[in-house]
Amino acid sequence: MITSLNFRRPLNICFSALSFTLVIVCFLITLAQWADIKESCKRQNRLYINNVTLFFNKYLSGYENIVNEMARTAADQHKFNPNENDDLTLRNWLIERLRIMPDAVSIIHADNDGHFIRLPHLESHQEKGATWDPRKEPWFTIAVEDTDSAHYSVTKDIFTGKERVLTISLPVINGMDGSNNGVLAINLDVEKSEEILNSTYPPMKSRTFVMTKDGQMVISPGYKIADSTLKAIASNASAFRGDFYRNGFYYFYRTIGPQEWFVVQEVAESEMKQLVRHGSIKVLYGMVLTQVILLFCWWALRAALNTIYMRITNGIRNGSIKQTAVEELLFDEIHSAQQRQEKISQDALTDGLTGLANRRAFDTDAEHYNALPNTHIAMIDIDNFKIINDTWGHTVGDVVLKATAELGLRLRGLENITLYRYGGEEIAVLFQDISQEKAQSYLEKWRISLNTRSFRESDLRVSFSAGICKMGGDSLSDVVAKADRLLYQAKKSGKNRILAS
Ligand SMILES: Nc1nc2c(ncn2[C@@H]2O[C@H](COP(=O)(O)OP(=O)(O)OP(=O)(O)O)[C@@H](O)[C@H]2O)c(=O)[nH]1
């Protein structure tokens, strides 16, 4: 009796192992994905900072080149004259340069004695310039000390009242004797630079600004950043370019200009996390979906197997199989396999021409019968079979053989009589629990029936001779030999007769 459905256990184990593996794999994938996405976000920001730096470098170096050209021209061709009317040529030339610099608000040319020209010239210059000494401005002192490289600084324009302008300054070096004749500087409108910075598209929500290496804001992102933050950024940004994390923010930076300023991008950690989470969540969704599908498959498989198993079990118990789908195939297969097996076994023991049991079956059965009580053996041989073959041909011979066997089978009724084709035209008969008289009478009936049977060949008459004896007592070969002797005697004494011992 089947008490439990054993397939459930391996199925459950299989499913659990699969689920567990899937969870582990997905967890590892998510972890790797998380790190990958985070690194990819950082890479995008670094690329962005590079592009912004490249742009600002080009922007500033364009102006720096013009300042350079102006400084050389001012040093080589013009002797600085504090009386503005005495140096109109220089002024006009400088005004021409100012016109080709759209973001430049002014040009200042100052000598080492504190004299200066400020272009464009405004009426108020006289009054403001009277008290202003350019030599006290940082862009002047540094530019003078700093030989011939351009200097960038953030200053206040006292002439227009602008609180912050970007100043690019260069020393004016005389090409003839190498003497330093002062400084030439241009002031750029910082608001224009802020507009440029704000029009860039960072890869994620962030703020971008330019600051000096010592923590001064140069181009702000449009709102104020605490001085302490700027100082902290300045102390962390120690390389030419790089990134670092501080107090919930990621900072990406790169130097611009003569490496005194930084372009800095500030990204909130929460923003970065949100993007990373957004990228990784797809893997998690995939994992959950796969788990659900797996669960459904497991449930469906279990239910299907359960049903099939129960039907098969009931079928086997009741002998009534409701043939549907899988179990129908299963039972058909089992049934036909059984039939095939039976046929193979039967074929191995059956004679192909007559349908009687063959010699191999006889050898097995006879041995068994010889050991049983009340058993008899008869050996039968068709008379003059060679003549039949020679006269009517082998086909007719075969028909005669088959007809003889058929008659024997038909006449034996339900009794325990088994017929064997012993070889050629010889037939052996085994009787069990039948008296010799009865056996003899059966053979007699058979002999007469065959002898009186008509064939298509009108003058064909068939008969057989037989010998019958009791089995047991002697060995099988002796018993067979005895029956054979009786048969021989029957042949000798005229054929078409049965002799018994
Ligand atoms: N057509 C046919 N002939 C067979 C078959 N098996 C054996 N024979 C023939 O049966 C003949 C047997 O001849 P014999 O042994 O001389 O016996 P017989 O002619 O019957 O003579 P008696 O036994 O003395 O009556 C041979 O010619 C065999 O070729 C068979 O399956 N089919």
Image: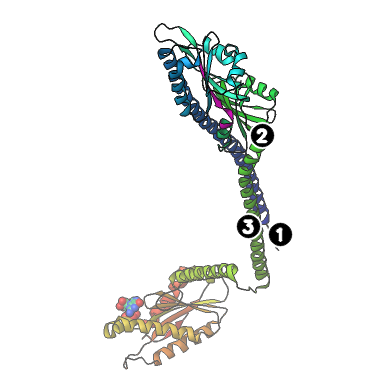
Q: Magenta segment range?
A: 184-192
**Secondary structure character of the magenta stretch overall:** strand
Q: Is residue 374 above or below residue 277?
A: below
Q: Earlier in the sequence, mark 1 or mark 2?
A: 1
Residue 416 visible, this orientation: yes
- Label pair 1/2, CB-CB below 8 angstroms: no
Horizontally, is 5 left or right of 41 in the view? right
Q: For residue 307, what is the image quadrant?
A: bottom right
Front disc: 3 or 2? 2
- Label pair 3/1, CB-CB below 8 angstroms: no
| Residue tagged 1 | 4
Front disc: 1 or 2? 2
Q: Which mark is residue 269?
A: 2
Q: Amino acid at mark 2?
A: Glu
Q: Which mark is residue 455?
A: none
Asked if the magenta segment contains residue 190, the reply would be yes
Q: Which mark is residue 297?
A: 3
Q: Residues within 10 Å of mark 3 (few under 14, many from 20)?
A: few
Point out residue 108 in the picture as x, y percentages from the top left corner. 52, 19
Point out residue 444 in the picture as x, y percentages from the top left corner. 46, 88
Q: Is residue 211 above or below residue 146?
A: below
